Image (tube, grey):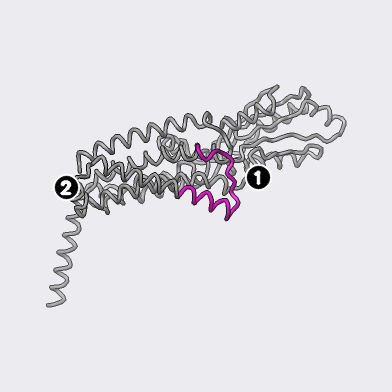
Amino acid sequence: MAIMTELKHAWIITIKEFKLLSRKKALLIPLILFPIIMIIFFGYGMGGTVKNAPILIINDDTGTASNSLVQQIGSYTGKYNGEPMFSITYAKDMSRSKAESQIDAGVYKAVLLIPSDYSDKLAKNESVALTLLTDSSDTTTSGIITNFMRQLFAKAGLVSLNVPNIYGNLEYLDFLTPAVIALTVFMGSVATTGSAIAGEKEDGTIVRMLMTPVSKRAVILGKTIYQLIMQLGRAVILILAAYFLVGFHMNGSWFLVALVLIIFTLGGVGMGIVMSTRVDDMESFFQLNMLVTLPSMFITGVFFPLSSVPDWMRYIAYLLPLTYANDAMRTIMIKGQGLSAISTDLVILLLFALITFTAGVHLFRREA
């Protein structure tokens, strides 16, 4: 009888937990959707493939040999899921500096320079060197393009390929580090701000706090200042660790990095406040936070370039602020570019910060 009584009580507790769960509307949806979303995003976002990578061929030669080479490259049929790996465009009379500026701007992933004496040298059985400029800040795509070109020219004994490192000798770690910093700041600012407010709501701390002379404005300002200091400190530690432990080199402005991270942190704080006002306890917040923030790391180009994901997923990525933070951080830290190169990213991140922070302040004042 004692066992039956214990089982009966256990069943009552079980029913009670399910009833509590049914009342947490914000928790039900993430519990169901999160594993489905993770399967989809893991499967497609971590593929590491290349599709439609833009390549420019600058042919300054007027002979037949270069035309044959251009046709050979253009007819390359390497595909992934029916889509070509490369998208080839052609030009003449473009200087190397202009070609590098096109790569800096992200217009092309690689530029092949065919010299004006290409056909003449081959006709005389003389060796000739072609130059391949690549966006080595995207180590995955540039590596695939370089390997393809090397294999192509290996068949022609007189043709060699010169691949200068326009951004220095980069590895996958250099591609990864700036985006990991942006990801850390994003997830950290959203999670710590939101969980703190959700926890204070759950245990009644925030009500007691607001019964003191402290205003709601001061509460928000204090949490924001805390996040700015903590996230910038984490970013500096990550950069220094990458430099001393694995040899990462910072090519750009520390001021611009700080500017991007401050704006991005403000947006993350705002998002954390918005999410915390929509839930009543910590458990619900953590489920909602995972649904909103965690999948974004797989489709915003943190681990692999955006060209590696399906088109429909890339459209989603362009709606997520982490995509633009990743691009801005890589443009500054790897390419060493200035403010003009990240102006579009900054405008979008400013809009994200303005919208989420304004909404967060409004909801916090209404809910608290």
Badge 2: few (under 14), some or many (20 or more) residues near its Cα, within 10 Å? few
Badge 1: few (under 14), some or many (20 or more) residues near its Cα, within 10 Å? few
Residue at the disc numbered 1: 169
Quadrant location of the N terminus in the rendered image = bottom left
* Location of residue 261 (image quadrant): top left
Element carrying mark 2: loop
From the viewer's perspective, is 243 left or right of 285? right
Residue 157: percent from left, percent from top: 81, 40
Residue at the disc numbered 2: 211
Quadrant location of the C terminus in the rendered image = top left
Mark 2: amino acid: Met
First in sequence: mark 1 or mark 2? 1
From the viewer's perspective, is 121 left or right of 75? right
Element carrying mark 1: loop
Residue 245: percent from left, percent from top: 57, 55
Q: Residue at x 27, y 38 (%)?
A: 361
* Location of residue 273 (image quadrant): top left
- Residue toward you, 148 or 332: 332
Residue 125: percent from left, percent from top: 86, 34
Mark 1: amino acid: Asn
Q: Which residue is drawn at 32% across and 37% down?
A: 357
Secondary structure character of the magenta stretch overall:
helix
Residue 178: percent from left, percent from top: 51, 44
Q: Does the magenta stretch include residue 252?
A: yes
| Stretch in magenta | 234-255
